[in-house]
């Protein structure tokens, strides 16, 4: 198999190819969803902030302890800094993350009566919350369309030849134009799951990739099916 040549690809052809890839990824990962655990919008917001520079699994281990002590914005805003640092310590960058949680919770109490707002423009005004975090919350806690451009999503969007943009906001807008808004959240899950399980940054499992025939970057990693299969993960990284 050779990489698909997308030279001269029209915008209509790009849309069709992109949507075909997403359909195949949906079939490949029927259980795709957010891999952070949460029970409500506040928990979703907090665990997403905590997930920076660490793994979802580590955040999930800390989550029960954190919310048992501080279940809502008011209690977290009033938390003892040293105790909060102790809880989030295993996640790394604990001082910065503690500061973010204290400021974030205080802002929710002061500006939104302790409720997480369901608008992107409001969410990004909160301390420590950028567009990526805001879209995670919108899509997963509120069921509102959002594209989550994390490192996996950006890498795959470029590898698949959907965009050449590197700025996350530009990537978000470029990919958003290729898909129906209703598909944005699940598209994010599909690409992130594929990036964590097969399309790795350094050595993608090209020979075991379900969308290889539509990928212009085919051959970046091993194309031998047996060798490639060894690289496939059954779950996201620990």
Image (tube, rainbow, N blue to C red):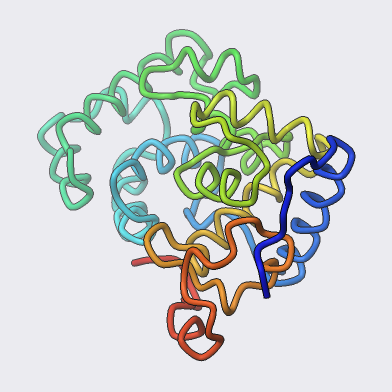
Q: Nearer the viewer, residue 90 or 8?
A: 8
Residue 25, image x, y percentages: 71, 64
Rendered view: 143 above or below 238: above
Rendered view: 8 above or below 192: above
Residue 24, image x, y percentages: 77, 66
Tell whether 115 sits left or right of 105: right
Q: Nearer the viewer, residue 3 or 230?
A: 3
Q: Residue furthest left?
A: 82
Q: Residue furthest top?
A: 111
Residue 113, image x, y percentages: 52, 15
Q: Nearer the viewer, residue 150 or 217?
A: 217
* Residue 108: quadrant of the picture: top left
Tell whether 151 sits left or right of 116: left
Q: Nearer the viewer, residue 11 or 18?
A: 11
Residue beneath the point at 55% across and 46% down: 153
Residue beneath the point at 46% across and 24% down: 130
Residue beneath the point at 36% across and 45% down: 51
Residue 86, image x, y percentages: 13, 44
């Amino acid at each position: 198999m050779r990489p698909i040549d997308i030279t001269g690809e029209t915008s209509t052809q790009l849309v069709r190819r992109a949507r075909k890839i997403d359909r195949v990824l949906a079939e490949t990962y029927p259980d795709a969803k957010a891999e952070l655990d949460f029970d409500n919008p506040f928990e979703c917001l907090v665990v997403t902030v905590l997930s920076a520079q660490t793994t979802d699994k580590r955040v999930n281990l800390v989550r029960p302890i954190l919310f048992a002590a501080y279940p809502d914005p008011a209690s977290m805003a009033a938390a003892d800094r040293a105790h909060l640092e102790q809880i989030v310590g295993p996640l790394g960058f604990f001082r910065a993350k503690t500061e973010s949680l204290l400021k974030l919770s205080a802002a929710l109490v002061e500006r939104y009566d302790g409720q997480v707002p369901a608008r992107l423009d409001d969410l990004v005004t909160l301390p420590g919350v950028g567009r990526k975090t805001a879209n995670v919350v919108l899509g997963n806690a509120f069921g509102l369309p959002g594209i989550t451009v994390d490192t996996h999503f950006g890498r795959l969007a470029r590898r698949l030849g959907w965009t050449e943009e590197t700025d996350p906001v530009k990537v978000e807008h470029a990919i958003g134009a290729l898909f129906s808004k209703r598909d944005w959240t699940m598209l994010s899950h599909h690409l992130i799951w594929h990036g964590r399980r097969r399309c790795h940054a350094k050595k993608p499992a090209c020979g075991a990739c379900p969308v290889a025939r539509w990928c212009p970057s085919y051959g970046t990693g091993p194309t031998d099916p047996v060798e490639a299969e060894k690289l496939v993960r059954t779950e996201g990284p620990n």
